[in-house]
Image (cartoon, rainbow, N blue to C red):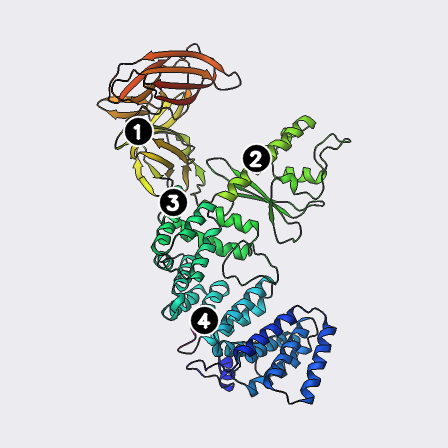
Amino acid sequence: MRSQWLFLAALGVPFGSAPVLAQTPAQRTVLEAFRDSLERVGDSLGLARTEAGMVALMVRGRANAFDHLRLGFLALRQADLGATRYFEDAASEFQTVTRMAPSWPYAWFGLGLAEFGLLHARSAQRTSTQPPLARASVALARAAMLDGRFADMLVEEAFQARRERYQPKVTVMLVALRVAAKPKAPNPMILAGLGRLEREFGEPGTALQAFESWLPQSGRQRGLALLEIARTRFLMGRQDGYTPYFDGAAFDDSATVSSYRDDLALIASGGELQQFDRSSGAQRVAHLRGFWGGRDAADLRMPGERLREHYRRMYLARRTYPIFLPGRPLEYIATASTVDDRGLMYIRHGQPDDRVELTTMGVEPNESWRYVRPEGDLVIHFVARHDPAVFRLVESLLDVAETGEVFNPSTRDLVSRGREALLRSREQMSPVYRRERRAGPERGRAFVLAERAMSLQSLRVATSTDSYRDRFATSLAARVDFAILQVDSAGARLHIAFAVPFAQFGAAWLDQGVEYPVRFRLSGFNEAGVVITALDTVARPITREVFGERWLAGTLSVPIPLGRLRVRVAMQDGDSVGTLLPLRSFEVLAPGALVLSDVTVGVPSHPWQAELGAGERVALLPLGLLWRTDRAEVAYEVTAPPGAALKSQITLMRADEQAGVVSNQQIAHPSRATRQLFRQVLDLRKLKPGLYRIEVTVTDGLGGLARRVREFDVR
């Protein structure tokens, strides 16, 4: 670094502040147009003719600094096309301009690019005592110090170099901005550019210092500076990124709003983006708080965790799954144009639980990812067709192979050899791919349809949702039953019964009736993502033997308001053993008209009982299973208006392949305006083993009708 400073001093760079620009706007416009025209030329012969014409004009007339500047960029373009000897010509022209017009930033910018070219052209013989890297970096730094807008150009050069896998050029640009930021009062644009490059290629701590130094000088870009500080703090895993994130979101300048929207668009739905677009100032801040708060609640995360994870994923996706294509626009963050589809899936759902790739003849580069979810696993497939490093989503694993026959008459098989290799490689990813399920033409046809349906459904869910869920090394395999009861004008209570196989704890069985503590977490939130009920407690279920098996059995309840809500529940024993249950949706109707609670089915002698107060209890069924020897009952609550003539119809039917009505019973109830609990014994002795559905329909004689359904197994 000392050698860079010696060279900087030799160039006469002022360290206090940048001088007034000497290049006129007209000259800058002409020069940019000239550079753009050069970039579109790929014919070195045509450039040579242009060079000859320019030199001839300069010989006949008196050459000025602007002529030398254009000739320098022409030589630089010729060198970029392969004639590396032109780097020396370009450097000579730019050096001439720096002597004639030392305050022209384009001259120093071009000199830095030329010196960098010479670094490789003369790598075998270094004739200068000044290291070429330092010469290039200092010249580029001088350009940025003369005009802060060149800091953005250095950042763009660095990101373009990474897209082209040209790391040495990235290093030069980073060092140049470090040098340019050394003066006591650097240009704010230099600090912004340095922060972006340090965060991406250098030290996040240094990046944060640059952004925090930029903030007091950011002026109309204050919102953007706050966002950059938040992004960097999140990347560093710090907890103090939330304040600058939400403070920055209140600014309404187009650059700030666009940056927030770009970050959001990677996971937000169309409706959420429309709401963002309609908001401003404090409304936008409220929208973002709800957006991230709803995701925290949905995945049982602490407030702010999902937001911090989002920026960590964006950073890693940009580094792990980039699209290396020339000519991309300047990008500081991950967007759909800077990462491939694997990167987009990573941003939405994080690291997959399982990942498989296959390399073989006749099959293009491919990957399959599996996400284990309580609602059902997601299995998604990627293939790289036109670029071996750019993977895109496909609708089916069978779409991955280059060629494949729908039906091969000679082998009577539905897949080609390449496709067969693909399917075998995925057998451990999903039972769908197991060989016995696709052997023979008839099974093969069914397999092709089933596999595509599964993959397409996974694709739809994966691309329309996002998640940040706890992952446990060992599952508790918990089973849960929910029932909404005790509905009144203030709300209702959600009763939860759970059963956990005791063997999952790896503990010694002492006896029945022993308490065993487990952590129980619940989050209930409305459609806007606002948390309306939450629970994080130590439940104390007891050990019980039921159906000849050992369980931990417990119940609890939480109050919930009227209206629609979604509920997520998790149970865990320590950090590595637990169960995250599927997201459940409920709706609690307000009393006044006819209201029917959930229908419960259970065995009063079993330990899972919902306490309704006044000594009333109803049995719940977390195992979802009844034995024909059990004395089971059906229970439900009804709230009806005064004078209602309540009638219930209880229909029991098979819900499996032997579907049909088993029994149908109608019951008249006394008319009362208060909430009433009705019970009915469920005779199981004459039922055959199978899946059953019980349907309760209640009418009030006033035109009101309500229906609830419940399923259970009988053995």
Sequence-wise, the earlier of marks 1 and 3 is 3
Q: As displayed, is residue 404 above or below residue 125?
A: above
Q: Quadrant of residue 246?
A: bottom left
Q: As displayed, is residue 556 above or below residue 602?
A: below
Q: Amino acid at mark 3?
A: Gly
Residue in the picture at 34% in, 20% down:
703
Pick whichever, 539 or 373, lies toward us. Answer: 373
Q: CA distance from mark 2 to mark 3?
A: 28 Å
Instruction: State whether residue 429 appears in this view.
Output: no
Q: Are marks 2 and 3 in contact (CB under 8 Å)?
A: no
Does residue 559 belong to the magenta stretch?
no
Q: Amino acid at mark 2?
A: Met
Check residue 454 in the rendering and tell me which mark sits there, or answer none. Answer: 2
Q: Are marks 4 and 1 in contact (CB under 8 Å)?
A: no
Residue that badge 1 annotates: 514
Q: CA distance from mark 2 to mark 1?
A: 43 Å
Sequence-wise, the earlier of marks 3 and 4 is 4
Q: Quadrant of residue 454?
A: top right
The magenta-colored residue range is: 182-190
* Percent x, y of residue 441: 70, 28
Sequence-wise, the earlier of marks 4 and 2 is 4
Q: Are marks 3 and 4 in contact (CB under 8 Å)?
A: no
Label 4 vs label 2, nearer the camera:
4
Q: Are marks 2 and 1 in contact (CB under 8 Å)?
A: no
